[in-house]
Image (cartoon, rainbow, N blue to C red):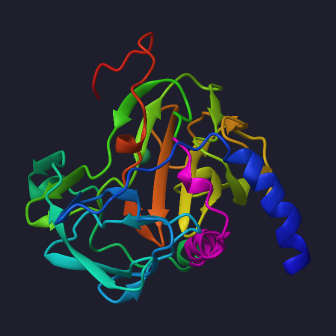
Amino acid sequence: MKFLAIPLLGIGAGLVAAASPLPLVVADPLVVRQGELVRGALPPGSRALTLDDAPVTLTADGHYMLGIDRDASGDHRLAWVTPDGRSASRPLRISAGTWDIDRLPARLVNQNPNAAPNPFWEKLRKAETDAIKAARAETTPWPFWQAQFQWPAVGRISGVFGSQRIYGERAAAYHAGLDIAAPHGTRVTAPIAGIVRLASDGPFSLEGNIIILDHGQGLHSVFLHLSRIMVKPGEIVAQGQELGRIGTTGRSTGPHLHWGMTWHGVKVDPLPLLPPLPPRTDLAGR
Ligand SMILES: [Zn+2]
């Protein structure tokens, strides 16, 4: 792979040239929010960063990212070795996110608990979830994630990360992404650069036409319900490059983009990473 890494780094350097420097994050304690993608930096020359004794990737210039689970809690610890060889650590505290929770009567559950398992559906679904898992298992060491994110589509926020319906005592899966509603055919562009790991216009049963982008070091974006796909697996895309068009394929009630992000499989909220929407855009709630 070494011969491939050299030209790839050359291309990558151009793609992330506009990255803004991340703030030094040595706050004590370091307070993070549920669902947050934390991006920070240690003094250059720091090494051996760990979170609760698990290694965390540090870039050559000391930058790191951490994904905080939507339901994470408790106290944790970041530890590293300083440039002059001393051990340093900080407590990491998790502050509660605020989620949009709908409590509904149990009788409204949209599912028949007595339905027999459907082998055809289960086989199809397994193939789809395996493809998604395989795409997210591939990640480049190149840190595309250091750039400032851009909106992947111009539209109205029609669904937020973490929202959830609870039917009586039974909680449905929470909404693990940001929904941007816009007319069918609206352009979808890369919020930051990445490598295409999945691009399927044979629609998946729930996700519809789907793209997964690898932003490096374990960070992936998924874009769902597209009407068209303009990229191919393995392609390196620049920030702002067109990926496809908004649609309503898969399980969707109207044209919108669902954008989800994962850090080593931990679902994180894209919205806090974005600059304000341009003022001409209607942002009038859900
Ligand atoms: Zn969604």
Query: Residue lying farthest top?
Result: 280
* Quadrant location, the N terminus: bottom right
**Residue 120 falls left or right of residue 270:** right
Magenta part mainly helix, strand or loop? helix
The image quadrant where one finds the C terminus is: top left
Quarter-of-image position of residue 51: bottom left
Viewer-proximal residue, 43 or 263? 43
Q: How many marks?
A: 0
Please tell me whether residue 264 belongs to the stretch shown in magenta: no
Residue 234 in view here: no
| Relative horizontal placement of residue 259, taking residue 71 as reference (left or right) | right
- The residue under the point 58% across, 74% down is 133
- Tell me residue 120's x, y (percent): 59, 75
Is residue 245 visible to us here? yes
| Residue toward you, 75 or 280 | 75
State the residue lying farthest toward the bottom. Answer: 53
Q: Nearer the viewer, residue 120 or 73?
A: 73
Q: Nearer the viewer, residue 8 or 170?
A: 8
Residue at x 49%, y 66% (from the top left corner): 44
Which residues are drawn in magenta? 123-148
Q: Residue at x 43, y 37 (%)?
A: 274
